[in-house]
């Protein structure tokens, strides 16, 4: 099984210098993860703020360089790609950003953001064809071209702009779309529409989606697999059915139990572990499991060295010593834990 | 609820924004009441007028917003007609607002304790200096913050702690009514739970009534007993949370609940087609008619009024009283067809005057 | 979202037109902006038409009877060298404006280019430009300008402009660099990168257009500052000696003790003219600032 996009032992450290190692912020720590080449998948990367999920997205998109470790696309190290390979990478791995307001240059009409990739990547041979491609992409995401093209961003709603963002990504004919919290700034009633269009992209176009979010509920709805991040490391990973319905890592359990369910028969419990206090201290000098200070099941070993990923089920692994009896999952094999069976959809090939 | 004394009564409140294009009716005749110690939620999306409503009730709205009608009665006395002096006396003491993004409006160069004390002193004058420290500690304790926080600056606290500090400042004078406008919107889910539980404990400790304004049905379900649904500046449904979740009677409420993703099962995601109406050019008749799968002729001409539709539920919809509950959704709306896109004029102004 | 959203919602208008309509409708803006425009228009009118309407020879030494107070014949009187004050004012004002414009344009252009490069490319380029700008900013500008002006044999209007510009580019460089740094982080720049746009493409197509409003608003400030600096140099006697300017008039007035001799019509008019130009520029700048900064606009 070959990997389409892979991050291997990647770390990203901010701040600090030769003299001041105390002020380091470790956004991502020694993380490994990949998505497969064979079938288009939708994977969620879930975490709260400070989990490193946005940094991971930037690394996967090639917008940031890792402090250590490598990012591979189609087997080639992104940092060492030739200009031609780099161009292909740039086109085939596309982002969708969170903020529908900032994602558009206020100086131009929205056409600009759709025309540019067609020009730069040479995807249209004439203006008519470019126009046709743009209109098709807009219709695919549920917009009417004659009410969208030719307008300035401030004349459209947040939801419409976000959908144009999806259309833009689609226009580039990508293999992977990294969507960084694509619906968190959109109204609830519109979220479903945008998320549904992401699912369409995977099913009908064979595009793998990496859905970055803090909202486990939408992650559950549209994704097959999930990676739960905590302070830059993987806490739990695997099929979304297992991880969310039956979380094994104490952090995931905390997350899932904190989701406000619109059902008064299922109320929040009253007791909570201590909150992560003031902004995390010197992360550089950390040893042991990052969740140890807050974990209700913490043991001595947790404070001594960070736990590897243990694999109690075939489609799930948790980085927690509570499961030390289970086999260890090597970093390079993380992708094997993903569930490729997507009930209710036709398996698509690229 | 009816046996408790009603501490806050809002009758037919109307708030308008004066814009270059004409008046925008952000709040269009909203009426509800809060009993002492009651927890009520107000749910609405952007453009529904919920934030305007919150600030207007406390009379903290600013031009170009104007209250153009209605009555607000707080603890039996008129609040809407009260003069500036009486207002300042009663605000914070009887009713408090925890505004949106309150944690970002903490003074970054003042210690938390001083900020809490500020509010107390402003209302009670210098005579309150005695015992001030204790009252600050008490205010912080009510939101679960240790006394040591008083000596710290906002940047030394985490997001959740800052939000709770803001809550402490707002409720330092132990008001009887607390209006919380999206108190957890910028917070992570675990911190959100903490803050909401804190709000709950605060409410119990003060035996205050809380009006929780937000867009997250789940949050409101976890916290509130009753809920009002706002659409285009009007209350379209109101009643106990359980009843409304089980059996929504207004089409908008029904579609809204249906669009919520759940952890129970994977289902086809359904949004609500179309866009909220322009508050500048409200259509004649029911404001939801353009997007309503049940709409018929009367809906487009006549505006429905809030009427009882079940023992404790009210809804503003022409389907009642002929129907007992909502009929099953017409077939065309169960599939996610390409949603109609209303012309941009509909959204522009609504977005501008906000939530 | 701003007022522009509401107004533009009515049709397909560019942000520029929308802003223009906003200006024309909003009561708060029209006062300062329109007043500023009117004042400067008057000055420009004088500057353009004036020299054709007066006899330039009257501004030469000994052309008319000296030291005359204002009268029907000499509306602004004459100076002790026998020059008609009105003619001097009409000829001098455009020259002062010219110096200000040259210095403003040159200073701002240099600032724009350096600020753009410095903010966008970071690294060594940024460090170099920043060090240069920061160190020169700390040097007392007037002292340098005095030295330059004193060493130049024959000072012309153009040279004056360049001298002032030489020390006027640092502040715009830093200000524009700050703007570029902020724009660089916006999501739409990342989108452009994802769209395959190269770094230079992003600079010209994404960053530069968003700087235009800011530059326009700063331009007025730059011109004001330049006029002030030029007048200062001229009043010290370092101005152009072949033409009249407002500052050199003040110099001559001071040199010939016009104050002590009570010849208010000699030192008065230049000062009034300078003040008038300044107030006009200031009001215009405040008005343009509101366009460039949408947050200020929202307060209506």
Image: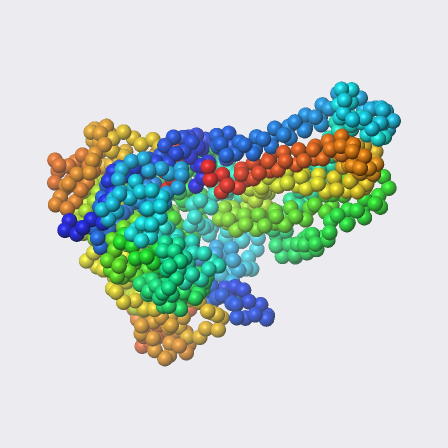
Q: Please, is residue C187 above or below residue B291 in the view? A: below
Q: In the image, is B10 to the left or to the right of B26?
A: left
Residue at horizontal 45%, vertical 33%? C8
Could you say which is closer to the camera, residue B303 or residue C264?
C264
At which x and y percent is residue B188?
36, 58
C63 relative to B84, above or below: above
**Relative to C131, residue A317 above or below:** below
Question: Picture coordinates of residue B62 (x, y %)?
Answer: 39, 41
Which residue occupies the foreground of this view, A160 or A2?
A160
On the image, the x and y values in percent for residue C144 come to 77, 49
Nearer the observer, A136 or B74: B74
Is A299 placed above or below C84 here? Answer: below
Regarding residue B355, the answer to whether it shows in the image is no
- Residue at horizontal 37 percent and vertical 57 percent from the top: B120
Residue A289 visible in image: yes
Please state, as top left, top right, bottom left or bottom right, where the N terminus of chain C lies in the image.
Answer: top left
């Amino acid at each position: 099984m070959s990997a389409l996009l892979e991050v291997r032992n990647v770390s990203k450290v901010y701040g600090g210098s030769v003299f001041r190692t105390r002020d380091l912020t470790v956004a991502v720590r020694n993380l490994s993860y990949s998505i497969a080449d064979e079938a288009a998948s939708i994977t969620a990367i879930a975490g709260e703020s400070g989990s490193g999920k946005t940094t991971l997205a930037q690394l996967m998109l090639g917008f940031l360089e890792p402090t250590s470790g490598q990012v591979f696309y189609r087997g080639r190290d992104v940092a060492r790609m030739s200009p031609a390979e780099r161009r292909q990478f740039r086109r085939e791995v596309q982002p969708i950003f969170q903020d529908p307001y900032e994602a558009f240059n206020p100086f131009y009409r929205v056409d600009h953001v759709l025309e540019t990739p067609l020009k730069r990547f040479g995807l249209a041979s004439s203006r008519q064809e470019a126009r046709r491609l743009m209109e098709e992409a807009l219709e695919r995401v549920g917009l009417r071209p004659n009410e969208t093209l030719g307008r300035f961003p401030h004349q459209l709603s947040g939801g419409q702009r976000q959908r144009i963002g999806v259309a833009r990504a689609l226009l580039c004919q990508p293999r992977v779309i990294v969507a960084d919290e694509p619906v968190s700034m959109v109204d609830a009633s519109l979220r479903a529409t945008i998320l549904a269009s992401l699912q369409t992209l995977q099913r009908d176009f064979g595009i793998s989606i990496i859905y970055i979010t803090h909202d486990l509920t939408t992650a559950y709805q549209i994704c097959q697999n999930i990676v739960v991040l905590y302070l830059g490391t993987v806490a739990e990973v695997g099929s979304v059915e297992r991880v969310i319905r039956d979380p094994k890592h104490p952090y995931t359990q905390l997350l899932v139990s904190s989701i406000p369910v619109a059902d008064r028969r299922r109320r929040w419990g009253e007791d909570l572990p201590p909150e992560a206090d003031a902004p995390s201290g010197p992360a550089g000098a950390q040893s042991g499991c990052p969740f140890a200070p807050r974990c209700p099941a913490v043991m001595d070993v947790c404070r001594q060295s960070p736990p590897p990923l243990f694999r109690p089920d075939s489609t799930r692994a948790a980085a927690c010593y509570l499961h030390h009896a289970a086999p260890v999952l090597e970093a390079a094999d993380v992708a094997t834990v993903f569930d490729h069976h997507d009930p209710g959809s036709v398996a698509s090939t690229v | 609820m009816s046996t408790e004394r009603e501490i806050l009564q809002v009758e037919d409140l109307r708030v308008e924004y004066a814009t270059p294009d004409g008046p925008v009716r952000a709040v269009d005749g909203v009426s509800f009441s809060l009993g002492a110690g009651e927890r009520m939620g107000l749910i609405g999306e952007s453009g529904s007028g919920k934030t305007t409503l919150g600030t207007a009730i406390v009379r903290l709205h600013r031009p170009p917003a104007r209250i153009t009608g209605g009555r607000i009665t707080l603890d039996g006395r008129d609040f809407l007609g009260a003069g500036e002096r009486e207002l300042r006396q009663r605000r914070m003491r009887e009713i408090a607002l925890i505004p949106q993004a309150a944690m970002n409006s903490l003074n970054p160069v003042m210690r938390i304790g001083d900020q809490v004390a500020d509010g107390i002193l402003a209302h009670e004058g210098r005579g309150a200096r005695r015992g001030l420290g204790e009252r600050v500690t008490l205010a912080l304790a009510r939101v679960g913050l240790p006394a040591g926080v008083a000596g710290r600056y906002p940047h030394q606290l985490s997001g959740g702690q800052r939000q709770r500090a803001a809550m402490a400042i707002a409720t330092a004078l132990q008001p009887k009514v607390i209006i919380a406008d999206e108190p957890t919107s910028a917070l992570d889910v675990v911190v959100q739970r903490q803050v909401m539980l804190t709000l709950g404990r605060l409410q119990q400790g003060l035996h205050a009534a809380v009006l929780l304004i937000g867009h997250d049905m789940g949050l409101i379900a976890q916290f509130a007993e009753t809920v009002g649904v706002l659409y285009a500046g009007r209350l379209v449904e109101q009643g106990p949370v359980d009843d409304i979740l089980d059996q929504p009677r207004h089409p908008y409420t029904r579609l809204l609940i249906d669009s919520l993703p759940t952890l129970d099962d994977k289902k086809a995601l359904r949004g609500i087609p179309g866009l909220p109406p322009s508050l500048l050019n409200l259509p004649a008749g029911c404001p939801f008619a353009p997007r309503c799968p049940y709409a018929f002729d009367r809906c487009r001409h006549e505006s429905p009024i809030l009427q009882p539709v079940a023992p404790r539920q009210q809804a503003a919809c022409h389907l009642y009283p002929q129907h007992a509950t909502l009929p099953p959704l017409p077939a065309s709306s169960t599939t996610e067809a390409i949603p109609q896109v209303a012309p941009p004029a509909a959204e522009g102004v609504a977005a501008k005057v906000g939530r | 979202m701003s007022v522009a959203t509401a107004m533009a919602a009515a049709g397909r208008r560019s942000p520029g037109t929308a802003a223009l309509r906003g200006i024309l409708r909003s009561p708060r803006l029209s006062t300062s902006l329109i007043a500023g425009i009117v004042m400067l228009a008057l000055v420009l009118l004088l500057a353009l038409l004036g020299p054709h309407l007066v006899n330039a020879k009257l501004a030469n030494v000994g052309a008319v009877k000296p030291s005359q107070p204002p009268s029907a014949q000499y509306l602004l009187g004459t100076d002790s060298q026998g020059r008609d004050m009105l003619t001097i004012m009409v000829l001098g004002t455009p020259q002062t404006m010219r110096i200000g414009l040259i210095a403003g344009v040159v200073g701002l252009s240099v600032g724009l280019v350096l600020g753009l490069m410095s903010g966008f490319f970071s690294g060594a380029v940024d460090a170099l430009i920043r060090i240069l700008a920061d160190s020169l900013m700390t040097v007392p500008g007037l002292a340098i300008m005095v030295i330059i002006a004193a060493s130049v044999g024959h000072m012309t209007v153009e040279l004056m402009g360049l001298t002032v510009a030489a020390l006027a580019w640092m502040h715009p460089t830093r200000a524009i660099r700050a703007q570029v740094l902020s724009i660089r982080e916006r999501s739409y720049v990342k989108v452009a990168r994802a769209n395959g746009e190269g770094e230079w493409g992003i600079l010209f197509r994404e960053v530069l257009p968003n700087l235009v409003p800011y530059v326009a608003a700063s331009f007025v400030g730059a011109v004001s500052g330049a006029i002030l600096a030029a007048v200062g140099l001229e009043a010290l006697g370092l101005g152009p000696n072949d033409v009249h300017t407002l500052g050199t008039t003040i110099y001559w007035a001071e040199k010939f003790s016009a104050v002590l001799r009570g010849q208010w019509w000699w030192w008065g008019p230049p000062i009034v003219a300078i003040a008038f130009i300044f107030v006009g520029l200031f009001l215009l700048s405040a008005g343009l600032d509101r366009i460039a900064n949408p947050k200020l606009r929202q307060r209506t």
